[in-house]
Protein backbone atom coordinates (compact mmCIF):
# COMPACT_ATOMS: atom_id res chain seq x y z
CA UNK A 1 0.00 0.00 0.00
CA UNK A 2 1.21 3.49 -0.85
CA UNK A 3 2.02 5.64 2.18
CA UNK A 4 -1.14 6.78 3.93
CA UNK A 5 -3.52 5.60 1.20
CA UNK A 6 -6.25 3.45 2.76
CA UNK A 7 -8.07 0.91 0.65
CA UNK A 8 -11.41 -0.36 1.97
CA UNK A 9 -11.78 -3.75 3.66
CA UNK A 10 -11.98 -6.74 1.29
CA UNK A 11 -9.78 -4.90 -1.25
CA UNK A 12 -6.23 -6.18 -1.72
CA UNK A 13 -4.21 -3.56 -3.68
CA UNK A 14 -1.33 -4.55 -5.94
CA UNK A 15 0.86 -1.77 -7.32
CA UNK A 16 2.35 -2.45 -10.76
CA UNK A 17 5.31 -0.88 -12.50
CA UNK A 18 4.67 2.16 -14.66
CA UNK A 19 4.28 0.43 -18.03
CA UNK A 20 2.55 -2.74 -16.85
CA UNK A 21 -1.00 -3.47 -17.98
CA UNK A 22 -3.39 -3.60 -15.02
CA UNK A 23 -6.25 -5.16 -16.99
CA UNK A 24 -4.08 -7.92 -18.46
CA UNK A 25 -2.42 -8.57 -15.10
CA UNK A 26 -5.78 -8.87 -13.35
CA UNK A 27 -7.10 -11.32 -15.95
CA UNK A 28 -3.92 -13.40 -15.76
CA UNK A 29 -4.01 -13.51 -11.96
CA UNK A 30 -7.75 -14.29 -11.79
CA UNK A 31 -7.40 -17.19 -14.22
CA UNK A 32 -4.15 -18.57 -12.76
CA UNK A 33 -3.92 -21.57 -10.49
CA UNK A 34 -1.86 -22.17 -7.38
CA UNK A 35 0.06 -19.38 -5.69
CA UNK A 36 -0.25 -17.10 -8.71
CA UNK A 37 -4.04 -16.94 -8.34
CA UNK A 38 -5.58 -13.69 -7.10
CA UNK A 39 -9.25 -13.74 -6.22
CA UNK A 40 -12.13 -11.38 -5.61
CA UNK A 41 -11.19 -7.95 -4.31
CA UNK A 42 -7.68 -7.87 -5.76
CA UNK A 43 -7.13 -4.44 -7.29
CA UNK A 44 -4.19 -3.91 -9.62
CA UNK A 45 -3.18 -0.32 -10.27
CA UNK A 46 -0.43 1.43 -12.22
CA UNK A 47 1.41 4.54 -11.11
CA UNK A 48 1.67 6.57 -14.33
CA UNK A 49 1.70 10.36 -14.28
CA UNK A 50 -0.30 10.73 -17.50
CA UNK A 51 -2.78 7.87 -17.09
CA UNK A 52 -4.74 6.47 -14.16
CA UNK A 53 -5.21 2.73 -14.74
CA UNK A 54 -6.60 0.01 -12.48
CA UNK A 55 -8.45 -3.31 -12.65
CA UNK A 56 -10.52 -5.11 -10.02
CA UNK A 57 -11.08 -8.89 -9.84
CA UNK A 58 -14.67 -10.00 -9.12
CA UNK A 59 -16.13 -13.44 -8.46
CA UNK A 60 -19.87 -13.24 -9.11
CA UNK A 61 -22.37 -15.84 -7.94
CA UNK A 62 -24.94 -15.06 -10.66
CA UNK A 63 -24.96 -16.44 -14.22
CA UNK A 64 -22.97 -14.34 -16.66
CA UNK A 65 -26.05 -12.91 -18.40
CA UNK A 66 -26.96 -11.23 -15.09
CA UNK A 67 -23.54 -10.76 -13.50
CA UNK A 68 -22.28 -8.76 -16.49
CA UNK A 69 -24.51 -5.87 -15.39
CA UNK A 70 -22.19 -5.17 -12.45
CA UNK A 71 -20.33 -3.16 -15.10
CA UNK A 72 -22.93 -0.42 -14.66
CA UNK A 73 -22.10 -0.24 -10.96
CA UNK A 74 -18.44 0.10 -11.88
CA UNK A 75 -19.18 2.97 -14.24
CA UNK A 76 -21.19 4.74 -11.55
CA UNK A 77 -18.30 4.32 -9.10
CA UNK A 78 -15.84 5.64 -11.67
CA UNK A 79 -17.93 8.76 -12.29
CA UNK A 80 -18.47 9.31 -8.56
CA UNK A 81 -14.72 9.10 -8.00
CA UNK A 82 -14.05 11.62 -10.74
CA UNK A 83 -16.73 13.98 -9.46
CA UNK A 84 -14.88 14.36 -6.15
CA UNK A 85 -11.96 15.96 -8.02
CA UNK A 86 -13.84 17.78 -10.76
CA UNK A 87 -14.30 21.52 -11.14
CA UNK A 88 -17.91 22.47 -10.39
CA UNK A 89 -20.71 22.88 -12.94
CA UNK A 90 -19.25 20.71 -15.68
CA UNK A 91 -20.98 17.38 -16.36
CA UNK A 92 -19.45 13.92 -16.11
CA UNK A 93 -21.30 11.71 -18.60
CA UNK A 94 -21.25 8.26 -20.19
CA UNK A 95 -21.13 7.45 -23.87
CA UNK A 96 -22.90 4.11 -23.97
CA UNK A 97 -21.87 1.82 -22.54
CA UNK A 98 -18.27 2.26 -21.46
CA UNK A 99 -16.80 5.67 -22.35
CA UNK A 100 -16.31 8.32 -19.66
CA UNK A 101 -16.66 11.94 -20.74
CA UNK A 102 -16.12 15.28 -19.04
CA UNK A 103 -17.93 18.32 -20.41
CA UNK A 104 -18.59 16.39 -23.63
CA UNK A 105 -14.99 15.27 -24.25
CA UNK A 106 -13.61 11.75 -23.82
CA UNK A 107 -11.43 11.40 -20.71
CA UNK A 108 -11.41 7.62 -20.26
CA UNK A 109 -13.49 4.48 -20.06
CA UNK A 110 -13.86 0.98 -18.72
CA UNK A 111 -13.74 -2.63 -19.93
CA UNK A 112 -15.06 -5.93 -18.63
CA UNK A 113 -12.87 -9.03 -18.76
CA UNK A 114 -14.73 -12.35 -19.04
CA UNK A 115 -13.32 -15.91 -19.16
CA UNK A 116 -13.13 -17.20 -22.72
CA UNK A 117 -15.02 -20.37 -21.81
CA UNK A 118 -17.79 -18.64 -19.83
CA UNK A 119 -21.38 -19.41 -20.79
CA UNK A 120 -24.34 -17.10 -20.34
CA UNK A 121 -26.26 -19.37 -17.96
CA UNK A 122 -23.39 -20.29 -15.63
CA UNK A 123 -21.62 -18.14 -13.04
CA UNK A 124 -18.19 -17.23 -14.42
CA UNK A 125 -15.14 -18.10 -12.36
CA UNK A 126 -14.21 -14.42 -12.41
CA UNK A 127 -14.86 -11.05 -14.02
CA UNK A 128 -12.46 -8.11 -14.23
CA UNK A 129 -13.59 -4.48 -14.25
CA UNK A 130 -10.77 -2.36 -15.67
CA UNK A 131 -10.71 1.42 -16.09
CA UNK A 132 -8.49 4.14 -17.49
CA UNK A 133 -8.64 7.92 -17.03
CA UNK A 134 -6.34 10.16 -19.03
CA UNK A 135 -4.70 12.45 -16.49
CA UNK A 136 -2.28 14.45 -18.62
CA UNK A 137 0.06 14.50 -21.57
CA UNK A 138 -2.07 15.95 -24.37
CA UNK A 139 -2.10 19.64 -23.45
CA UNK A 140 -5.29 20.16 -25.42
CA UNK A 141 -5.88 23.59 -23.90
CA UNK A 142 -2.70 24.82 -25.55
CA UNK A 143 -3.27 23.35 -29.00
CA UNK A 144 -7.05 23.50 -29.28
CA UNK A 145 -6.79 20.78 -31.91
CA UNK A 146 -8.70 17.96 -30.25
CA UNK A 147 -11.85 19.28 -28.56
CA UNK A 148 -13.40 15.79 -28.53
CA UNK A 149 -10.85 14.43 -26.02
CA UNK A 150 -9.46 15.84 -22.80
CA UNK A 151 -7.37 15.14 -19.67
CA UNK A 152 -7.72 15.86 -15.98
CA UNK A 153 -4.87 18.39 -16.20
CA UNK A 154 -6.46 20.24 -19.09
CA UNK A 155 -9.78 20.49 -17.27
CA UNK A 156 -8.29 21.90 -14.09
CA UNK A 157 -9.01 18.95 -11.82
CA UNK A 158 -7.75 19.03 -8.26
CA UNK A 159 -4.53 17.16 -7.49
CA UNK A 160 -4.87 13.44 -8.14
CA UNK A 161 -2.68 10.47 -7.32
CA UNK A 162 -3.03 6.97 -8.86
CA UNK A 163 -3.19 5.01 -5.60
CA UNK A 164 -5.66 7.39 -3.95
CA UNK A 165 -7.84 7.51 -7.07
CA UNK A 166 -7.90 3.70 -7.18
CA UNK A 167 -8.73 3.51 -3.46
CA UNK A 168 -11.50 6.07 -3.87
CA UNK A 169 -12.94 4.06 -6.75
CA UNK A 170 -12.86 0.94 -4.59
CA UNK A 171 -14.79 2.71 -1.82
CA UNK A 172 -17.45 3.94 -4.25
CA UNK A 173 -17.64 0.53 -5.87
CA UNK A 174 -18.24 -1.22 -2.55
CA UNK A 175 -21.15 1.17 -1.91
CA UNK A 176 -22.51 0.38 -5.38
CA UNK A 177 -22.18 -3.36 -4.75
CA UNK A 178 -24.16 -3.00 -1.52
CA UNK A 179 -26.88 -1.20 -3.50
CA UNK A 180 -26.75 -3.98 -6.10
CA UNK A 181 -27.28 -6.64 -3.43
CA UNK A 182 -30.14 -4.70 -1.86
CA UNK A 183 -32.07 -3.77 -4.98
CA UNK A 184 -30.35 -5.00 -8.12
CA UNK A 185 -30.55 -2.80 -11.18
CA UNK A 186 -33.40 -0.81 -9.63
CA UNK A 187 -30.74 0.78 -7.44
CA UNK A 188 -27.98 0.97 -10.07
CA UNK A 189 -29.65 1.86 -13.36
CA UNK A 190 -31.10 5.31 -12.47
CA UNK A 191 -27.69 6.78 -11.60
CA UNK A 192 -26.15 5.35 -14.77
CA UNK A 193 -28.99 6.49 -17.04
CA UNK A 194 -28.97 9.98 -15.51
CA UNK A 195 -25.41 10.42 -16.81
CA UNK A 196 -26.02 8.94 -20.24
CA UNK A 197 -25.20 11.23 -23.15
CA UNK A 198 -27.85 12.24 -25.64
CA UNK A 199 -30.91 12.13 -23.40
CA UNK A 200 -33.94 13.96 -24.75
CA UNK A 201 -37.24 14.82 -23.13
CA UNK A 202 -39.21 12.71 -25.59
CA UNK A 203 -36.94 9.68 -25.05
CA UNK A 204 -37.07 7.26 -22.13
CA UNK A 205 -34.11 4.99 -21.38
CA UNK A 206 -34.06 1.70 -19.55
CA UNK A 207 -31.83 -1.34 -19.06
CA UNK A 208 -33.18 -4.78 -19.91
CA UNK A 209 -32.63 -7.92 -17.82
CA UNK A 210 -29.63 -8.92 -19.97
CA UNK A 211 -28.10 -5.43 -19.79
CA UNK A 212 -29.20 -4.17 -23.19
CA UNK A 213 -30.01 -0.46 -23.41
CA UNK A 214 -33.67 0.18 -24.23
CA UNK A 215 -34.75 3.47 -25.77
CA UNK A 216 -38.43 4.37 -26.06
CA UNK A 217 -38.71 7.22 -28.54
CA UNK A 218 -41.50 8.68 -30.61
CA UNK A 219 -40.37 6.41 -33.45
CA UNK A 220 -40.70 3.25 -31.32
CA UNK A 221 -38.52 1.08 -29.11
CA UNK A 222 -34.85 0.65 -29.93
CA UNK A 223 -32.40 -1.81 -28.39
CA UNK A 224 -28.59 -1.62 -28.15
CA UNK A 225 -26.79 -4.92 -27.53
CA UNK A 226 -24.85 -4.51 -24.27
CA UNK A 227 -22.46 -7.42 -24.79
CA UNK A 228 -21.56 -6.42 -28.34
CA UNK A 229 -21.03 -2.78 -27.32
CA UNK A 230 -18.72 -3.83 -24.48
CA UNK A 231 -16.75 -6.02 -26.87
CA UNK A 232 -16.15 -3.11 -29.26
CA UNK A 233 -14.82 -0.77 -26.53
CA UNK A 234 -14.70 2.12 -28.99
CA UNK A 235 -13.07 4.48 -26.50
CA UNK A 236 -9.99 2.24 -26.16
CA UNK A 237 -6.87 2.12 -28.35
CA UNK A 238 -5.50 -1.47 -28.09
CA UNK A 239 -2.25 -0.59 -29.86
CA UNK A 240 -1.30 2.12 -27.36
CA UNK A 241 -3.17 0.60 -24.41
CA UNK A 242 -4.82 3.90 -23.53
CA UNK A 243 -7.92 5.96 -24.35
CA UNK A 244 -8.12 6.89 -28.01
CA UNK A 245 -6.75 10.22 -29.14
CA UNK A 246 -8.26 9.74 -32.61
CA UNK A 247 -11.92 8.96 -32.05
CA UNK A 248 -12.55 8.50 -35.73
CA UNK A 249 -10.34 5.41 -35.66
CA UNK A 250 -12.68 3.71 -33.26
CA UNK A 251 -15.86 4.21 -35.22
Image: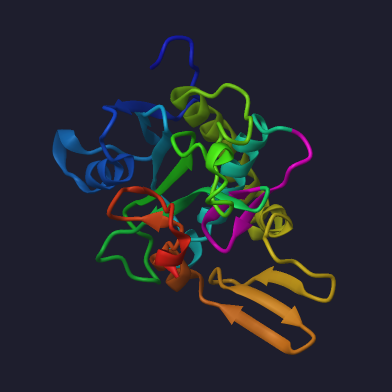
Locate residue 22: give its quadrant.
top left
Q: Residue at x 77, y 73 (%)?
A: 204
**Residue sitting nearer the eye, 41 or 84:** 84
**Residue 51 horizontal/vertical position (percent):** 42, 35
Q: Residue at x 47, y 59 (%)?
A: 67
Question: With 195 as the anchor, is 66 left or right in this view?
Answer: left
Exactly how many numbered labels are in the figure? 0
Picture quarter with the C terminus: bottom left
**Residue sitting nearer the eye, 182 or 97:** 97
Q: Is residue 70 magenta?
A: no
> Can the viewer see residue 251 in this picture?
yes
**Residue 222 horizontal/vertical position (percent):** 64, 83
Give, as a single range, the part of the protein colored magenta: 88-102
Question: With 95 as the anchor, is 45 left or right in this view?
Answer: left
**Residue sitting nearer the eye, 171 or 236:** 236
> Can the viewer see residue 63 in this picture?
no
Question: Outermost residue, top direction?
Answer: 3
Picture quarter with the N terminus: top left
Q: Is residue 94 magenta?
A: yes
**Residue 241 horizontal/vertical position (percent):** 32, 48
Amino acid sequence: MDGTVHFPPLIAPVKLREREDAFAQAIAAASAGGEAHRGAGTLFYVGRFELIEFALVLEPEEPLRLARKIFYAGMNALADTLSMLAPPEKPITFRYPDALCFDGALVGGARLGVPADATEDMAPDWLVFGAMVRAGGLRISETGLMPEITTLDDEGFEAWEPAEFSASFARHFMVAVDAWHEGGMRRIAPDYLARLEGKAKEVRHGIDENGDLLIDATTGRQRTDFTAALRRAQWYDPLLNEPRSDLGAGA
